[in-house]
Image (cartoon, coloured by chain):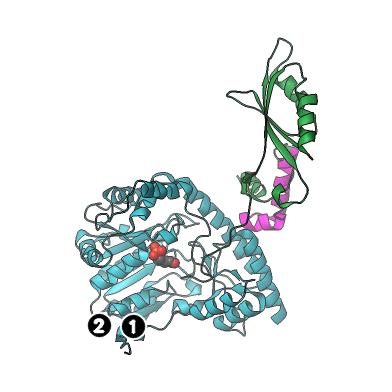
Amino acid sequence: MTFELSDRVQTVPPSGIRRFFEIAEERDDVISLGVGEPDFATPWAARDAAITSLEQGKTSYTANRGKRDLREAIADYVADRFDLGYDPDEEIIVTAGASEAVDLAFRAFVDPGDTVAIAQPSYISYEPGVIFAGGEVLPVPTYEEDDFRLTVEGLEEAGADEADMLVLCYPNNPTGAIMPAEDLEPIAEFAREHDLMVLSDEIYAELTYDGEHTSIATFEGMRERTIVFNGFSKAHAMTGLRLGYALGPAEAIGAMNKIHQYTMLSAPTTAQYAALEALDSCENDVREMVDQYDRRRQFVLSRFREIGMDVFEAKGAFYCFPEVPEGFTAEEFAEEVLREQGVAVVPGDVFGAGGDGHLRISYATGLEDLREALARIEAFVDERA
Amino acid sequence: MSEREVLELLRENARYSTADIARMTDLEESEVEAAIEELEAAGVVRGYQAVVDWDKLEDERVRAEVELNVRLDRETGYDDIAERLARFPQVKALRLVSGDYDFDMEVEGDSIREVSQFISEKVAPVPEITQTVTHYVMTSYKENGIELGDGEDDERLSFSP
Ligand SMILES: Cc1ncc(COP(=O)(O)O)c(C=O)c1O
């Protein structure tokens, strides 16, 4: 039999980084700056809690929304860190990664034909998520001259006033941009004025190097229309444990839970034990990792300047977003530097509008490797100069 | 606070160049140099050494952890005994500790014989020392905060979202 793929699946192109992955796999001398996940292992206390839970045979499903004590811990944590108040019983759902939470939101709130505005460049899963849910994507480009921050003019220009929903990702993957409170305020106003629901992916919130992270849900009238996503993958170095969560008004979280309880049932139990411990006792581990990222960030930014490549001053996440030198497209640069120098980077185009002409460099890699990778990039650029 | 930051980085890897440290801390290279000089002059930084995994070398290197018990008298204090022991080049580390014994001493030599002889001929006879218990190091898993053994490969996907 031949498989008749659904239109939704057919519409989504294969991932833009797949091709690079194949080249990189062919050789063994590649230093990858293409990895969007921590190079640290999960803090030991959290791993130990996971192991202990396994030893005790805690391997059954949990409540659909996640363990009650974990939801409470999350409520305390977000209140404490980000000034967000959510009721653990009704307004929090624990999911298999922030990825699942984002997908639940698209499926719960997007009807066929609905328009979802996405501030770009951004994480590559939003667009397919919208398409799988039957919605239409409205790209809202952000630009380096605005520090890759989203502006009301940008929203208006893209026609986002007509959209049903707006997706934000700050601190941003891939640019490392953040949105300080004063930049979010007018966006919040725009959302209220045009009655947009807001999906705010704040998974990199802890990884904010300049000032404090502000959630758009803290602005007046925003809590009612916003779903906040967060999780343990990035700050707690738990990518493989697959644990995230969403915060929102009871009705919205209830709708997401309806889908979750039929598709996922509950998030991984072992990971929930790890997460509980992570919130309970791993604050220092998080601080230490954030310090390390910050040092690497400064190192990488300063090296790009020395190499003579324009680079945006990333202030969050663990990415920086330099411009490719003249005479290259991002794709060409990425492919040639991979083939000639064995350094894997991701071309900015794959992250959507506004990303072209840039590279995403992840510094979630040891300093020795970063130093070598940047020396190779320097050699590559010098050769072409 | 920049001194503290520089210190942390040196402890992480004393071979970071001043330029690297400057890039990481957003200081001027000259400021990093000054901070290091200051730390050295103040005796905070006492030296720079390599962390070695002896198991990876052909040459045998024997190390032992020695527990020492001492009896003090009116004239002799811990510091006097320590001073005497610390002079021996075989002694790599010496610490006064709380608990069941008084000093914790790390000794290194080229052979078990050499280390044993050193303990029996030089250490045990010190009059204030009442007991020595020698533990030979069989395998070292971690030194100076660095895990030894085979470096773990990075098994992450070479690209990820
Ligand atoms: C912005 C953003 N959101 C979500 C995710 C996925 O997170 P999780 O591992 O919790 O599914 C990523 C991973 O790269 C990301 O960059």
Which mark, by number, is residue A372? none
Residue A70 at least partly seen: yes
Q: Is residue B27 magenta?
A: yes
In front of the other: B78 or A247: B78
> Residue B103: x percent and y percent?
66, 26
Q: Quadrant of ligand 1?
A: bottom left
Instruction: Give the percent coordinates (x, y) of residue A110.
Output: 25, 75
State which chain disc 2 sits on: A
Label 1 CB, ligand 1: below 8 Å?
no
SS for dot 2: loop
Given the image, on which type of amino acid does mark 1 rest?
Val
Output the letter for the chain in green.
B
Horizontally, residue A9 falls left or right of residue A327, namely left
Q: Main secondary structure of the magenta part?
A: helix
Outermost residue on the left side: it is A251
Q: Find the distance from the CA under tag 2 to the CA under tag 1.
A: 16 Å
Do we see residue A186 in this rendering?
A: no
Number of the label disc, if any, that sits on residue A113: 2
Mark 2 neighbour class, 10 Å CA radius: few under 14, some 14 to 19, many 20 or more: few
The chain holding disc 1 is: A
Q: Residue A259: x percent and y percent? A: 23, 67
Indicate the quadrant containing the N terminus of chain A: top left, top right, bottom left or bottom right.
bottom left
Q: Are marks 2 and 1 on the same chain?
A: yes
Q: Which residues are magenta?
A: B16-41
Q: Which chain is cyan?
A: A
Above or below — where is A250 with respect to B49? below
Q: Is residue A107 above or below residue A37?
A: below
Q: Which residue is mark 1?
A: A9
Left or right side of B108 for A273: left
